[in-house]
Image (cartoon, rainbow, N blue to C red):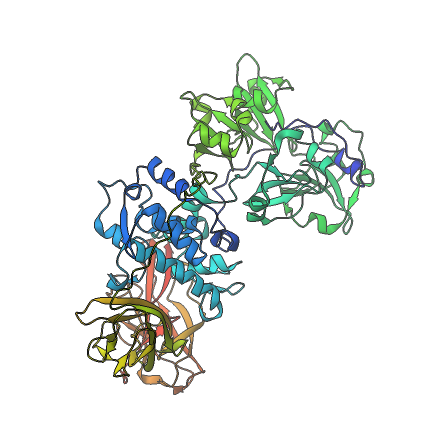
Amino acid sequence: MTTRNAKTHRIPTAYATTLALAVLFSPLQPVAAQVFNPHRIFTDAELQDTASLSTAAIQQFLEKNSSVLATYQETVNNERLTAAQIFTRVAKDTGISSKFLLAVVEREKGLLRKSAGDAKASDLDWATGYSCFSGGCNDKYKGFFNQVESTAITQNIYNKRASEFPFQVGKSSKTRDGFLVTPKNQATANLYTYTPYVGHSPELGITNGLGGNRLFFNIWQRFFAEAKYPDGLVITDGASYWKIEGGQKRKFKTIELYLTEHQPLDAITASAKTIAAYADGPNISFANNTLVRSAASGQALLLQDGKQRPIVDESALAKLSDFRLALSAFSEITQVPTELLEPYAVGTPITENLAYPQGKLFSETGTTTLWWVQDGIRHPVHPVIAQYTWKDRAPQPATTGDFSRYSAGSPILLPDGTFVKNDDGNYYIISNGERRKITSAELFDRVFGSERRNNAIDVPDEVLSLHAAALSLDYINDGIQDPPPGPTPAPTPAVLPYQVGTVTVSPDTLTGITNQTLPVTVRGINTGSTTWRRETVTLKINNGAPVALNESSVAPGQTGSFSGTLTFPSQAGLQPQSFGIFGPHGDVLTRFAKFAVIKPGVAAEVVSATVPAAVKNTWRPVTVTVKLKNISTNQPWKSQKTALKITGPDGKTSPFYDVNDWIRTDVAAVPINKKTIAPGETGEFKFTLKVKGIKPGTYQLRFALELLDAKKTVLIDGQDTWLRTLRVDK
């Protein structure tokens, strides 16, 4: 177990003098929510790790969770497959991780933990939500296998044609819940392309009820993440050591530095794949509670809990009495390069009047009450926490009156990375000041090791309850392997009368604009035993009218062709187009989909907008300017006929309607900078929002742009409506 006072080693490096000044007492533990980085949710390697799970591992996981998928079976290409086999089959065929596919199924329909009695047929038919939008779903993709396979294929399309989608690596784009996300890798960009919502994340200012990619993150972290070690733990490859903080790995500059605060066996040996799954954070160059001096400014600093705390003068330096060192002048403190201080945010300055900036443990005379006093604030300490955290140090006695001058603070928590066991025998790890339940002893031993479980400290429930509950840890057992296959006779392929081999579509890339028609040619090899006739074999595009063969007949082994017309739908974006070749009785010989990139024919792009995040209901009308770029292919906007509409979430009149400024109850403005906004030009809309007297709360503004003369709705950033959230305060 890691202990905070395990400092038994010295560092024979250039930083030896600096590190020798480390404070002997431990810091106050900050409390934070589980770290969610919306810009890097998981890695490219994890998305494409097709060897991550065996069929047996998936089956065991489904059975353990009493999932409806544990007993689900479906016939695929005349072969009966279980759900677990479908996941591994699709992963092998597409190169997309079965862990990812499992996580999507759980996010969309909750099928990993939904029992047969709770699951509906529609949950299985639309397991990944693929090709479902605007309240409807495309029947071409109905069925569990179709859903899983199409989701995997789509990921490869996103990878191959990354530049054609709005969410791109290194490019900032707004999600539909209003967050500006900059994906750090392609896997994260794919998540937003598939589901363009962050989801409920109050710390990011997103308070809607949508699951989105925050829900995916929670599922991924609970069951599937390769970066499976929470904040507070230390991992090693045997040569280097990293501390997990903020979901990143921070490398100790030297092994000796690691040993100033940890025992040699504290670190968990992790695989190269697991280590690579963490983003790199700044290196750890100093022990916590270290005195340094900036080489650039000469400022003396206490590096404490991730902050650089300025020491205002040498009288304040004397307050740091627990250094046990005769330091009376700044000149005695080692200077360090400025770049090593960059990872530290500026913290509270240390003055001579600040009580115990390094923190001190006290016992209240005549009672069993313990206090940790730091920066003039007293924090209650449970005896169990004190015994574990400061087991080698006796508290200093003080009377009750000695504490009256200090403000009351929150209780001291167990250090991050502490493994505990409660009164019911359940195991937890403390991370970011929260408790994360480890769902079984088997999981504990598999992920963290049996020795750490045996050394977990017993804590009463009153101590455990000081730590807020966070996501449980229930990692799938990815070490389970499939049994080796036995010898099987080679199958004799059946030759059916009507059968289709390789199929191609020309043009190879389907790109166009909404409602455009495009001539296409489909070719397929006759691999059956019967000659195709023009009247017996036909093609259907998007379930349209049958298209006859170009040839009068196609003998077995020859290639037949069909020439038809594809009409793009009115919705822009990546849209699947369905193709099917049918036999003489309407039986399906083959059915497949090809994706088309469809650009809006009439569209706008938000250049800038001054919609405030919050207002007070005592203010005068707030002036707003919105600039929209005309990115239509050939549709100009006539100023007096281009209406910027604003409504409430229910489509009714917005509560911010200003009768003294708006053109109509639903039309806030028209372009004021030009009479005609040609494609490529930007229109400027200016209007006011009446906020006085509105009830405090959070409101949604729904913007729409309409060409009244052309009777067309202009897509804004690819959507019919552009949403903004506005908070009204008193």
Front residue of 543/449: it is 543
Where residue 83 sits: x, y (%)?
A: 32, 47
Front residue of 155/364: it is 155
Relative to 414, residue 592 above or below: below
Where residue 186 sits: x, y (%)?
A: 50, 60
Q: Would residue 428 be found to the left or right of residue 375 on screen?
A: left
Relative to 623, residue 361 above or below: above
Front residue of 580/244: it is 580
Q: Residue furthest right?
A: 331
Where residue 524 sits: x, y (%)?
A: 33, 74
Disc count in the image?
Answer: 0
Relative to 720, residue 181 above or below: above
Relative to 501, residue 681 above or below: below
Q: Would residue 711 be found to the left or right of residue 245 on screen?
A: left
Q: Residue furthest top?
A: 366
Where residue 373 sits: x, y (%)?
A: 59, 28
Q: Which residue corresponds to the image point at 44% horizontal and 41% vertical from the top-left? A: 484
Quadrant of the drawing holding the N terminus: top right
Front residue of 325/77: it is 77
**Residue 719 visible here:** no
**Residue 689 visible here:** yes
Q: Which residue corresponds to the image point at 60% horizontal and 29% vertical from the top-left? A: 2
Q: Residue furthest bottom?
A: 675
Q: Would residue 400 be found to the left or right of residue 15 on screen?
A: left
Q: Which residue corresponds to the image point at 27% horizontal and 47% vertical from the top-left? A: 73
